[in-house]
Amino acid sequence: MIKISIFITLITFLFNYNNPLLAANLNECKWQNRTNIPCVEIKKHISNTSKFAKSNINSVLFTKKEIEEIGAIDLIDILKFVPGINITQSGPKGQQASVFMNGTGSNHTLVMINGIPINDQSTTQGLHDFGVDFLQTVQQIEIYPGSSAVNFGANSIGGVVNIILTGDYKESVSLSKDKNSGQEFSGNKTFVYDNSSLNVKIGNVKNKSISARGNVSNEKDALNNYSTNINYEKFINDNVRIFNTTYLRQTKAEYDNSNVNQTGYEGDNKMGSLQFGLEKQLDSQKNNYIFYYNIYDREYDERGTIDTYKSQVLGLKYDISRLVNQTISFGAGSEYKYDWGSFNNKGSYEASTKGNSDNLAIYGNLGFNFLQNSNISFFARSDKHKHAGKNNSYKLNFDQNFGSFNLGASYMNSMRNPTLYEMFGTDNYGYSGNINLKPEKSNTYEVYSNIIFNENFNLSLRAFRANIKDNIEYIDNKYQNDTDNINLNQSGFNNQLKIKLKNKSINLFSSFLSSKKENNADQLRRPEKNYGLIIKSKITNNFFGDLDFNLMYNHYGKHFDTHSSNFSTIELDSTDLIDLKVSKKLFNSNFFVKISNILNENYQRPHGYNQDKRLIRFGIKY
């Protein structure tokens, strides 16, 4: 009852405080202008789209400005506010984290940098570790919930997270500290020449928080993250530019193994991404050529026993999108990538793998805008995998606009290719890889609507039903495609209401999910309901002047999990987490204080792994 009272008091304060300020102009520049530097706006480039097909792709966007308003430090701080996403993390920041999109598995979410896949192929099932990604050098986060293989490629059965790294003309330095000796630092500098620019961003996060396992008063688990993002672009003429993005990231984190209160366990997760591109854009046509190289180098020190994981990928990608006339658009492209990797686990569990694969994809789309208010789009993609063979995916979408609202429906077909370990791995329990694995495949049906009540109220609704067949399972010391003809089934309803008032904005979101195993039991770590809100408010105080308040609330529902000691299935209680950030602009600086987990919830997610309790952080951005 006390927690509810505190929450109601905070909301009442933000809604009823007298504030004479007018709302900020939503059309103003994302960054301040400098002499001879144009106002910059990031525009999404989505593979396999064209003008009349792009509008039918479901997406959630967080700009740099919104990331800073929330006070987000890592990717988890953003994803927890997206309907349909569930997250578990094996301890505080820096620990391994899994994301379940629309009820699918953690290996069904594709992660990208600037539209290029970066999932680490040296992991057992190709899943991405979301706990090691921090946001100090990131410009934008794009989330595409739902089956998206026709646009982004394999492994996107559940959805896609696209990390945007690009230049930023607003030079800045930022520093924050908290009571646990944690600190965050970032810097941004841009060099501008006649027809080109060079942007350099650096970031560092340090933390020494609670132990991942055991009592919260036990030993601390330290975190140290470094990131660098270098962006270069040069305009050959008004329509042609070349560009390069280089991203380097290292995350060192102490962790605990299967017992409580352990020391001497540390993970060193290094990752690099290099992209070279050429873009040609005319009034009715756009061409993109991109060459990319990604590398992972991970080491885990278990009291002197070193486990190593390494993977690399080389790729080449070409996209074209064209507007044929005022009713028809089309796009096409091709992508080739070559993956190779290995890992060697030398602990009590011994496992290793070494192998390679390649994939050639050809894709295209057609958008047809007829009767001005009706839109039909068709997407198709064909992938030829070295081992899994040729597989097709496609999407059909219809969208009808009725003025103040639209109504649409989609059918999507997606897949996940087997990983290197599933095909080539071995372990000391008799496992051997299966080179004959087929891809997992899914079918997804969606119905959606976007209702604009007026310029201040916007409601988005989306219902889906999906199934996964040929799922890859570990049976009799071998990964095999399931042959019982029983699918994994997911269904749900996600909605988002955005309200804009004179001096406030409110974003309310919720999701309702049903995710079932083959025996029709609930899947673990997928709550049936999540909901939350983000409130932004400008307040004028006689003493402090103008203040910006950002209140974030997230309810994570009850769900089933595995007991960390006896491995039985248990039900974990729901959590209600509230964060508050207050900031003040003074001269060229922005001073802020953020209180995380105001209600001081003591919880574990997953079971046996402690999460941070109440934390106060102070900072300044110049």
Image (cartoon, rainbow, N blue to C red):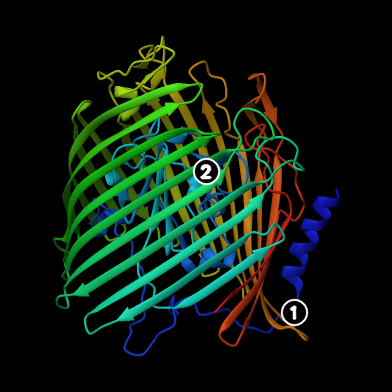
- Asked whether, in this view, residue 508 is left or right of residue 613, the answer is left
Looking at the rendered structure, the number of numbered marks drawn on it comes to 2
Q: Position of residue 238 (x, y in %)?
A: 17, 78
Q: Position of residue 241 (x, y in %)?
A: 19, 70
User: What residue do we see at 30% from left, 23% from top?
Assistant: 423
Q: Amino acid at mark 2?
A: Ile
User: What residue do we see at 32% from left, 19% from top?
Assistant: 433
Closer mark to the observer between disc 2 and disc 1: 2
- Asked whether, in this view, residue 76 is left or right of residue 476, the answer is right
- Residue extending farthest to the front is 304
Which comes before the other along the chain, label 2 or label 1? 1
Report the Cα–Cα distance between label 2 and label 1.
Answer: 36 Å
User: What residue do we see at 54% from left, 31% from top?
Assistant: 514
- To which residue does mark 1 refer? 18
The answer to whether residue 440 is seen in the rendering is: no
Q: Is residue 476 above or below residue 143?
A: above
